[in-house]
Amino acid sequence: MKASSQSAAAARRAHRSSFVVALAAALCCVAALLGFGAALDGYSHWRHPPGLLGAHGIERALAFNLLGYIGPGLALAWVAWTLIEAARGQRATARIGAWLWLWSALAWAAQGVATLDPQDLDAQASRLHALAWMLWWLAFAPGAALLAYASLAAPAWRRFGAIALFAAAVVALAVLAADWRLVPGAPAQRVALLAWLAAYLAAARVARG
């Protein structure tokens, strides 16, 4: 009995700290993008993708990959794990959706490991980076839809469900519109990233509650 109460208390502490972790991850990611972008001569947020800052041969690429991709991705994967724990009493769709968000966060981190080769976009490293980017949003969007559906049966989750669904729509529209060349790719990627980060902040509040 004592062990179970201690385990429950530890879970509550983890849930409460998840918002702090999510906020730190979001700020770190955005600050890395802005800071390293300003430090790289000729870099434009309007014309260049975030991945260029961590590409082969780019100055301070390792630092950007750690602060912009790997660190935030792993931190938000932990936030998704707390969401999985919080979803134990919800519908199965909530748990599946939370697992997809965990994989989305890991895919974001993977972009800092499989870095772009700006001299050869057909190289294996560039292909793996593109695959991680694709998995990032393809795991996030359906996961958000499942979480939104599960929130219909959980009044405390309904605001989160609405935020998740809205974020998924923004991410999907931004990525697809850029792929179809309806909008510039670099700004669309940044809009998608901000919507994604906001969704994890909302998830952290649910897990904390």
Image (tube, helix red, strand yellow):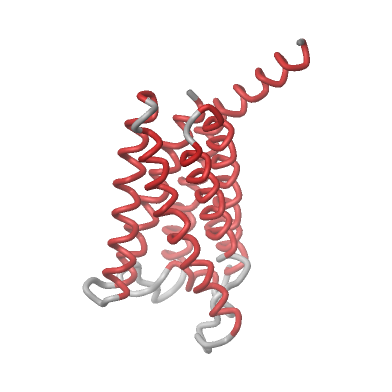
Q: In this view, does 145 lie to the left or right of 24?
A: left
Where is residue 170, by image quadrant? bottom left
In the foreground, 49 or 76: 76
Where is residue 103, by image quadrant? bottom right
For the N terminus, the image quarter is: top right
Name the residue located 61 percent from the left edge and 58 percent from the top edge.
66
Name the residue located 31 percent from the left edge and 64 percent from the top edge.
188
Q: Image height check: is 97 above or below 114?
A: above
In the foreground, 31 or 83: 83
In the foreground, 10 or 23: 10
Total numbered labels: 0
Name the residue located 26 percent from the left edge and 72 percent from the top edge.
184
Residue 118's spot in the image, x, y percent?
Answer: 50, 83
In the foreground, 20 or 108: 108
Residue 21's spot in the image, x, y percent?
Answer: 55, 37
Q: Image height check: is 142 above or below 42?
A: above
Q: Image height check: is 193 above or below 88?
A: below
Residue 154's spot in the image, x, y percent?
Answer: 39, 27
Residue 195's spot in the image, x, y percent?
Answer: 35, 50
Instruction: In the displayed orientation, state which residue is furthest to the front.
Output: 92
Name the residue located 32 percent from the left edge and 74 percent from the top edge.
179
Instruction: In the displayed orientation, state which residue is furthest to the left.
Output: 182
